[in-house]
Amino acid sequence: MNQKLIVRAVAAVFTAAVLLGAGYVIGTHRAATDAPMASAAAATPSAPGDKVDPKTGRKVLYWHDPMVPKQHFDKPGKSPFMNMELQPVFADEGGSSGIKVDSTLQQNLGIRYATVVRQDTAEGFDAIGTTQFDESMADVVQSRVTGYIDHLYASAPMQRVAKGAPIASLFVPDWLAPQEEYLALKRGGMDAGLLAAARARMQALSIPDGLIASLDRTGKAQTHATLFAQQTGVLTELNVRDGAMVSPGQTLAKIAGLSKLWLIVEIPESLALQVQPGMMVDATFAGDASQHFSGHIREILPGITPDSRTLQARLEIDNAGLKLTPGMLMRARVSGAKPVSRLLVPSEAVITTGKRSIVIVRNNDGRLQPVQVAVGNDSGDSTEVTKGLTEGQQVVASGQFLIDSEASLTSVLPKLEGSAAPGASASAPASASAPAAAQTYETTGKVEKVTPSDITFSHQPVPALGWGAMTMTFGKPSPTAFPDVKVGESVHFVFKPSDDGYQLTQVEPVGGTK
């Protein structure tokens, strides 16, 4: 009996020792586990009234649905848009505006940055021009008498001719009588007064002085006259043929010079008010950029071309080397006399959507944020920014990253925001974070609630988005849209992504059942 008591006492003592040791180990482990949590809570001190996440003890700015990030909530709970819990945005992660993109994603996207700079550049713009004949240098070949084309030396329009080259030979029958009369007076020994009167009559009939001098030397009447080119150029007009009769004042041909040409510059209507006579123009031939031709705008032609909506400016360029011909396409840089200080960014950094211009700015904390800007004129590979940026800011200037369409702002940026949003739900469909602007989706469901701004459905799965069956609210395109939709009705509906979530495009009853 005493032996049994001794055994029980020893067992009790052993059991107490084991329990004491286990309690010590558990207490030590719990203290080690709670220490980081306590330090994490102490890292973000919260004042009375601050929102605090009960799980982590960190200060919360607001709760939101990652599918509709623009809508903020003051407390946690179920999302009114999706069948999921609201996610917190912490003060130490979500205090800055913009999109947080980690370094790995930046490298994968090939993002590179450029600095907004201010430079003194010549105020100007690029334009397109074409060369034309200088009409002020045109030479007209006309007949001053009635006659016939005895021989036509020129064969066709646009033929090149040299200065002094014959154009046409005329037979003039009316010249015979006054010349014979002059010769008869001269043979009869008439006084100088009668001879002078006969000579004046021949001049009045447009007989050239050279032909009259030849008449005095040879004593033979001549009835043919040759018309010559007064300058080197091109026959832009040839209005007669061999044997044709001509009359006084008739234009036989027109010769345009090539030593000087007009350059007609097409200026966009939006820049019409910036163009002034005297502005300098540096033009290059489209086929050879090394060939430069310069000049000053001589005059602005009145009127806007209806088809191209452009204003035409005309200047004179030197073509002494005859390298240019009319009709050539030229790239022209029109610039003012004085340089102007302008704020410049790389042209590839500007996303033009048609309604606005966007630049992706890198904030001081490394976040990327879209900023709407007002742009001016281009200067080479740079674009002037007149509003929205300041000197020294960093902007994204990556051709691989920028997409020049509105879809980049409704698809690419939300995708980046979804990938970097703090506390984003792992169950949220990844494809829903980056909806394609033109993509639509459809499913069937039951109408749960109808308001002027939206309709709530308990709908079937949407495989294209990876959604299961859920209750969700969709926006209406206008308060008067879908007036016949009633609560409790079974419908088939089509929707698309929008800036505020998802917007309905079509709602139709399913077999008329309710």
Image (tube, rainbow, N blue to C red):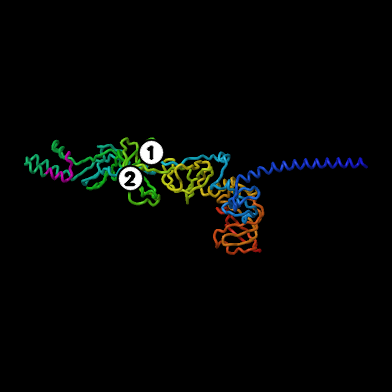
Upstream in sequence: badge 2 or badge 1: 1
Instruction: Name the image quarter holding residue 143.
Output: top left
Type of secondary structure dominating the magenta stretch: helix
Q: Mark on residue 457?
A: none
From the viewer's perspective, tell me whether residue 391 is left or right of residue 37: left
Under mark 1, the amino acid is Phe
Q: How many marks?
A: 2
Under mark 2, the amino acid is Arg
Q: Can residue 294 be seen in this view?
A: yes
In the picture of the structure, the residue carrying the numbered disc 1 is: 285
Specify the segment rendered in magenta.
198-210
Mark 2 residue element? strand
Q: Which quadrant of the figure contains the C terminus?
A: bottom right
Mark 1 residue element? strand
- The residue nearer to you, when weighing 454 against 444, is 454
| Magenta residue check for 202 | yes
Q: Can residue 126 be seen in this view?
A: no
Q: Mark on residue 314?
A: 2
Residue under the point 77% across and 41% down: 22
